[in-house]
């Protein structure tokens, strides 16, 4: 895809989302259940959409919230539900809708003390710490966020009693019940008025900020960062972690500068992404261009997406790290600097993450667990303490506490950002320098992800492929060694396929939210070999889709 000519520049005023139009659409537009695009659908990170496209409207949230309340009752989940929201405009509206339904169903809800925003990892942390004590029944949570998606989008995701994204069995049940409620014109949805919701004794203010910040020293070596006087620059990108960095700096004596304290639901201060849209993607050099201009002012600079489950790491001199590269460095560092972690513990990667991770883990003599796309596949392992680290190529990851017990079972942009500072403080070298050493040892990878337009029928075919559907024996001049439709780490279906040779691979899977399929490619040979991989991967996928 060609780079938009305004990529990396601020959007013009007339191109910003029209907030009155967006909010009017949320309340007035009604989803048509017969239209697949307007049904409730849980992808890898919950239900997402836009009120303008009738895919994220009050009707959807009423139905989802009622379904969640009924699911909790069926599972005897009686503890408080931890509810958070990010800074997208639709998040505030959906937050109130959810509250009105949950309280009508008698659900006790804990929300941020004095209002405000709550990041995804903070919700996960709160669920896990609550359930460890188990004094008031088991708890779960909801986060109102479309992650890094554009300002006009909304999203909602359910975190189970194990703290992380609910597994497919749960989300399938919730989606089915929510669509039944939509089909019946929301008959069966319980809801309180705004006044009655506010008066309800079921809403409990909770100090998420201090609860999370006070515990950080048990997962990150904060003393080492403070002692080394690491200068940290932070661009919150207008996200839900905006009010966390100052308490972190104050409690642990860190040198943290917030380079942009603004919060605005139009996200007008975020430069346009490569396609010319505002997207709070902290792994994009275009969206992160504001912070990149300041990279030499700090030892480490970090950015996060609106719900803080992603991280962008900027090293002085070298710039924004590739997300795959940072995952490889984080795994190597943690395996060597967490002495209480068992030697046989697993390190997790999604099957579309870089093969560099495979080489690093193998070189360390550790165990790799390769799973399908979606952080939900790490929840059980991290919850039980069998998996030390879980990461995704899209710049999301989390890891265990120093004592090898669970920290979060959802992606945590805070600890991944602070880990970069710890790496520099402890080793004297920034993460990019460590990655350069890995390249010298294991080879230079060339990685790419592309989107290809696809119909719903084609996406369905791709998601149901069998190994026997691939008849080719070579790819980009090399013998095909593996064709996978199930992840080797846990045997779960990947919803597509992955084809590997000795020095390259590609994976193709349908998008859960757009009419495209995604192709991930990597070569350990050259850019030219990567181009050949891309050409032949498209041809192979076209052949099995019969397009």
Image (cartoon, rainbow, N blue to C red):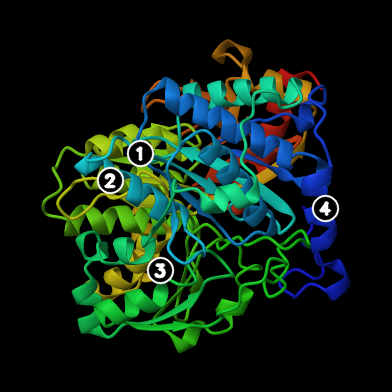
Q: Earlier in the sequence, mark 1 or mark 3?
A: 1
Q: Which mark is residue 24?
A: 4
Judging depth in this view, the residue of 201 and 255 nearest the camera is 201
- Of all residues, the one furthest to the left in this rendering is 340
Kindly check if marks 2 and 3 are in contact, taking CB atoms under 8 A apart as contact: no
In space, the residues marked 1 and 4 are separated at their CA atoms by 33 Å
Mark 1 secondary-structure assignment: loop
Disc 2 marks which residue?
A: 130
In space, the residues marked 3 and 4 are separated at their CA atoms by 46 Å
Mark 3 secondary-structure assignment: helix
Query: In the rendered view, does 493 fall on the left or right side of 40?
Result: left
Q: Is residue 90 above or below residue 268?
A: above
Disc 1 marks which residue?
A: 139
Mark 2 secondary-structure assignment: helix
Instruction: Residue at 20%, 43% (x, y): give it.
Output: 133
Q: Earlier in the sequence, mark 1 or mark 4?
A: 4
Q: Earlier in the sequence, mark 2 or mark 4?
A: 4
Query: In the rendered view, does 210 fall on the left or right side of 18?
Result: left
Q: Is residue 412 above or below residue 64?
A: below
Judging depth in this view, the residue of 322 and 172 nearest the camera is 172
Disc 3 marks which residue?
A: 432
In space, the residues marked 1 and 3 are separated at their CA atoms by 39 Å
Judging depth in this view, the residue of 90 and 104 nearest the camera is 104
Local packing at callout 3 (Cα closer than 10 Å; few below 14, some 14-19, many 20+) is: many
Judging depth in this view, the residue of 532 and 162 nearest the camera is 162
Q: Is residue 106 above or below residue 232?
A: above
Kindly check if marks 2 and 4 are in contact, taking CB atoms under 8 A apart as contact: no
């Amino acid at each position: 895809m060609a780079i938009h000519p305004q990529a990396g520049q601020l959007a013009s005023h007339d191109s910003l989302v029209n907030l009155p139009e967006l909010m009017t659409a949320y309340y007035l537009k009604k989803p048509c259940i017969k239209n697949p695009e307007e049904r409730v659908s849980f992808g890898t990170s919950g239900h997402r959409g836009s009120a303008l496209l009738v895919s994220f409207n009050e009707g959807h949230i009423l139905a989802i919230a009622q379904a969640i309340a009924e699911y909790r009752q069926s599972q005897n989940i009686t503890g408080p539900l931890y509810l958070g929201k990010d800074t997208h405009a639709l998040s505030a509206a959906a937050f109130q809708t959810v509250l009105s339904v949950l309280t009508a169903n008698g659900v006790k809800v804990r929300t941020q003390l004095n209002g405000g925003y709550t990041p995804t990892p903070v919700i996960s942390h709160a669920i896990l710490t609550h359930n460890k004590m188990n004094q008031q029944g088991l708890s779960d949570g909801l986060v109102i966020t479309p992650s890094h998606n554009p300002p006009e989008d909304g999203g909602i995701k359910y975190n189970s009693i194990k703290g992380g994204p609910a597994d497919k069995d749960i989300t399938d049940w919730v989606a089915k019940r929510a669509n039944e409620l939509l089909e019946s014109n929301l008959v069966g949805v319980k809801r309180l008025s705004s006044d009655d919701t506010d008066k309800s004794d079921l809403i409990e203010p909770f100090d998420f900020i201090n609860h999370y910040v006070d515990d950080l020293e048990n997962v990150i070596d904060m003393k080492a960062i403070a002692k080394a006087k690491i200068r940290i620059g932070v661009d919150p990108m207008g996200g839900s972690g905006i009010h966390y960095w100052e308490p972190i700096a104050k409690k642990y004596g860190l040198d943290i500068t917030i380079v942009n304290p603004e919060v605005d639901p139009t996200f007008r201060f975020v430069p346009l992404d490569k396609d010319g849209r505002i997207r709070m993607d902290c792994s994009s050099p275009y969206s992160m261009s504001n912070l990149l201009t300041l990279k030499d002012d700090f030892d480490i600079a970090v950015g996060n997406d609106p719900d803080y489950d992603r991280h962008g790491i900027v090293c002085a001199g070298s710039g924004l790290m590739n997300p795959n590269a940072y995952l490889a460095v984080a795994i190597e560092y943690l395996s060597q600097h967490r002495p209480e972690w068992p030697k046989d513990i697993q390190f997790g990667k999604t099957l579309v993450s870089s093969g560099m991770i495979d080489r690093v883990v193998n070189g360390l003599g550790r165990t790799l667990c390769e799973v399908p796309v979606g952080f939900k596949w790490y929840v059980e392992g991290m919850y039980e303490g069998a998996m030390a680290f879980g990461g995704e190529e899209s710049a999301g990851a989390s890891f265990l506490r120093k004592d090898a017990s669970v920290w979060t079972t959802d992606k945590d942009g805070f600890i991944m950002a602070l880990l970069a500072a710890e790496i520099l403080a402890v080793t004297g070298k920034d993460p990019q320098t460590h990655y350069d050493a890995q390249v010298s040892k294991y080879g230079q990878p060339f990685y790419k992800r592309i989107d290809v337009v696809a119909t719903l029928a084609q996406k369905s075919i791709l998601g149901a492929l069998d190994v026997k559907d691939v008849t080719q024996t070579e790819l980009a001049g090399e013998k095909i060694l593996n064709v996978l439709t199930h992840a080797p780490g846990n045997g779960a279906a990947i919803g597509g396929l992955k084809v590997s040779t000795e020095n390259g691979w590609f994976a193709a899977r349908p998008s859960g939210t757009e009419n495209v399929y995604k192709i991930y490619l990597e070569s350990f040979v050259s850019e030219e070999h990567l181009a050949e991989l891309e050409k032949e991967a498209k041809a192979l996928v076209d052949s099995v889709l019969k397009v």
